[in-house]
Amino acid sequence: MSEPLNLVLFSGTADKLHAAATLVAGAAAMEQPVNILLQYWALDAFRTARADDMLGLAWDAISEGTSRPVHGSKAIPWMETFRMAKELGEVQILACTGSLDVLGIDRSELDPIVDSEAGIAVFLAAAGEGGITFI
Amino acid sequence: MTSTLEELTAMTAAKIVDARGSACPGPLLEAKKSMGTVAIGDTIEIWSTDPGTKSDIGAWSGKVGHEFLGVVPADGYDRVLVIRRK
């Protein structure tokens, strides 16, 4: 079996979530297991109330006057990509309990795509010897 | 084994996956999903307007153990052929 792809998702902007979703979907298709830990603004973006929002691109990706429209793009919305990835492969999505606490989010507010809440040790144990990418 | 363009063009796929208009990773995900619906030994054909699909499907086939046959260029899209091998 392949080494898992281990991602800590921290950012809640569409560009980073979309890039992460693409990577996760690719890994799922390639039969590589994926472990995801959601923290802070990424966790916020996975709330049911926000999960299918068309989020903005990060300010640091936009020069003044050159913002690019994301509407009407052929790209699949980021949440839809995560859902497809989960359908196709072995993708585990954990919600960081510390971040839930800091942001005042209840577990029940999260999209059903999130498997469970977990502490950092659970994520690290699942990550095994593989590297961790922080987005 | 490498098939010639003529041989590829003459092939009949068990399933055609029309992923035209979908951006990466859409066509790859469609291919993966459809592969589960045909029998081992059957051929699927992915139609894609994304220029990355032909090399993506090749890399995916090699990694997971399917047989990548090749690409037939069509009018504004690619027809990518793969045999399910597992």
Image (cartoon, coloured by chain):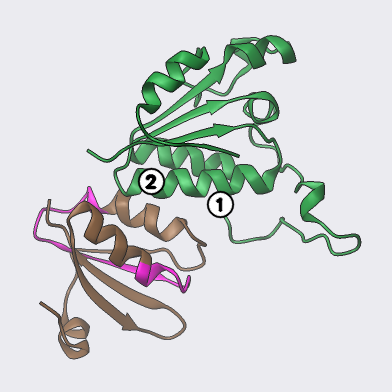
Amino acid found under the numbered disc labelled 1: Ile
The residue under the point 22% across, 38% down is: A1
Badge 2 is on which residue?
A27
Q: Nearer the viewer, residue A25 or B23?
A: A25
Badge 1 is on which residue?
A76
Q: Can you give x and y, in whole percent of width and height, for residue A117 in the image?
A: 52, 13
Chain ID at mark 1? A
Secondary structure state at the residue bearing disc 1:
loop
Q: Which mark is residue A13?
A: none
* Neighbour tally class for label 2: few under 14, some 14-19, many 20 plus, Cα within 10 Å: many
Residue that extends furthest to the right in the rendered view of this protein:
A64
Name which quarter of the figure residue A6 lies in.
top left
Distance from label 2 to label 1 (Cα)?
16 Å
Q: Which residues are magenta?
A: B35-55
Query: What chain is the brown one?
Result: B
Q: Can you give x and y, in whole percent of width and height, for residue A32 in the image?
A: 32, 42
Secondary structure state at the residue bearing disc 2:
helix
> Is residue B75 placed above or below A22 in the rendered structure?
below
